[in-house]
């Protein structure tokens, strides 16, 4: 379905904000030119905040600038990608092929743990540079360490968590698109099959966040509207079409929206649990509706997102909206740029069909 003129105008507006403000700001202010690597946060005054750094931020920023090049940003996207990727593959690399979680600004390790979430984003970052041999090593190291099970489940602190499994699915799909190794497609298939058969509650159609090692849902585990949207578009991207995936998007929209934004969590009966609203949930709402070419949903998702982008320094954002309608006064987290770029990229792709 051809996108109407209003959607094309929205796409151009978001790309202008991204190209003219966000991408330049984060590669100029958000990158540490002294020690290397990426700052976690930039204050609402436009100044970087010193502090420890996570591998996931370097990985996400590497992917962001690789994707910016595909979107047509004329800025130094290759240099920015390589700056972030260098930090990931030096500061955070462990000898076993996995990546540690946390380091100080000078590169000193602060947490050697190999969280599966970090591994998923390392794979995504490596896809943006075509470094497949390193990515295969990460995949094999995850399997050897017991983080990745044969059924596609991701083990994290003794439980099967949907969140790192979802981001691994995203990263593996990226490698299906650009890689040559024969292991990517079967892994994506296994993750999709387990998501459809095990993560989704047959009674409600909603995807649950947390399971024991036998795929029994933890009784008080959340249902997150943002992840209904995110799993929805990821499954559609891999499968081509799926009634269950479309149902996830519908659940997010029907049960997860209050005051025009996607709230953080529901219980397993799909009743609101945490009515605060994070920025990333708004981007995933926009992304999902762009994926299914629901233009009304795109406009509503974009309206919710733009509330977060209305800040004094263009290119920054708010992260958390409270149930009373006020934003938490805090620095902008660099990790959110990945979500924004992903949504803009999906909208741009929908407009080019």
Image (tube, rainbow, N blue to C red):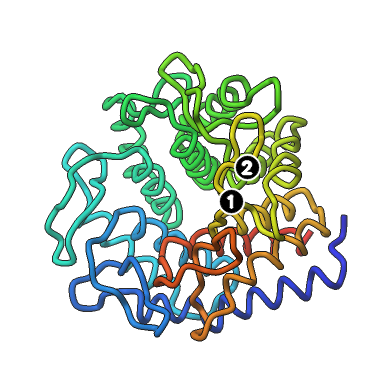
Cα–Cα span, label 1 and label 2: 6 Å
Q: Position of residue 198 (x, y in %)?
A: 57, 21
Give the residue at mark 1.
275
- Viewed as shown, does residue 130 lie left or right of 84? right
In what quadrant of the picture does the N terminus appear?
bottom right
Res 332 → quadrant? bottom left
Q: In this view, does 34 lie above or below 183?
A: below
Res 54 → quadrant? bottom left
Res 94 → quadrant? top left
The answer to whether marks 1 and 2 mark residues whose Cβ atoms lie closer than 8 Å is yes
Judge the density around disc 1: few (<14), some (14-19), many (≥20) Cα neighbours within 10 Å.
some
- Viewed as shown, does residue 65 lie left or right of 265? left
Image point (37%, 75%), residue name:
42
Image point (59%, 78%), residue name:
310
Judge the density around disc 2: few (<14), some (14-19), many (≥20) Cα neighbours within 10 Å.
many
Q: Position of residue 217 (x, y in %)?
A: 51, 21
Assign a secondary structure to mark 2.
strand
- Viewed as shown, does residue 302 lie left or right of 116? right
Image point (66%, 55%), residue name:
287
Q: Position of residue 341 (x, y in %)?
A: 55, 64
Q: In this view, does 266 lie above or below 310?
A: above
Checking the image for residue 272, the label placed there is 2
Question: In this view of the protein, which residue sits in the foreground, 55 or 239?
Answer: 55
Q: Where is residue 209 in the image (x, y as percent from the top left)?
A: 51, 33
Assign a secondary structure to mark 1.
loop
């Amino acid at each position: 379905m051809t996108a109407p003129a209003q959607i094309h105008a929205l796409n151009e507006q978001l790309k202008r904000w991204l190209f003219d403000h966000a991408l330049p700001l984060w590669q100029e202010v958000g990158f540490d030119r002294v020690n290397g690597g990426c700052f976690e946060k930039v204050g609402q005054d436009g100044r970087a905040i010193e502090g420890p750094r996570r591998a996931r931020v370097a990985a996400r920023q590497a992917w962001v600038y690789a994707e910016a090049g595909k979107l047509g940003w004329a800025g130094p996207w290759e240099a920015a990608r390589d700056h972030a990727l260098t930090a990931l593959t030096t500061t955070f690399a462990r000898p076993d092929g996995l990546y540690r979680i946390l380091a100080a600004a000078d590169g000193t390790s602060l947490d050697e743990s190999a969280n599966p979430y970090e591994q998923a984003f390392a794979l995504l970052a490596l896809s943006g540079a075509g470094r497949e041999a390193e990515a295969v090593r990460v995949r094999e190291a995850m399997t050897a360490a017991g983080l990745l099970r044969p059924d596609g489940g991701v083990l994290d602190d003794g439980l099967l968590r949907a969140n790192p499994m979802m981001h691994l699915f995203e990263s593996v799909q990226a490698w299906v698109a650009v890689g040559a190794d024969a292991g990517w497609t079967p892994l994506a298939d296994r993750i999709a099959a387990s998501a459809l058969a095990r993560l989704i509650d047959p009674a409600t159609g909603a995807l649950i966040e947390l399971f024991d090692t036998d795929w029994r849902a933890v009784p008080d585990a959340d249902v997150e509207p943002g992840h209904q949207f995110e799993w929805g578009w990821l499954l559609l991207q891999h499968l081509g079409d799926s009634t269950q995936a479309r149902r996830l998007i519908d659940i997010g929209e029907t049960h997860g929206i209050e005051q025009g934004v996607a709230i953080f969590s529901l219980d397993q009966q799909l009743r609101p649990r945490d009515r605060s609203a994070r920025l990333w949930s708004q981007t995933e709402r926009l992304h999902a509706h762009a994926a299914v070419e629901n233009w009304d949903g795109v406009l509503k998702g974009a309206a919710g997102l733009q509330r977060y982008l209305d800040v004094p320094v263009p290119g920054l954002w708010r992260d958390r909206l409270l149930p009373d309608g006020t934003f938490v006064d805090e620095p902008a987290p660099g990790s959110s740029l990945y979500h924004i770029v992903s949504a803009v990229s999906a909208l741009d792709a929908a407009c080019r069909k």
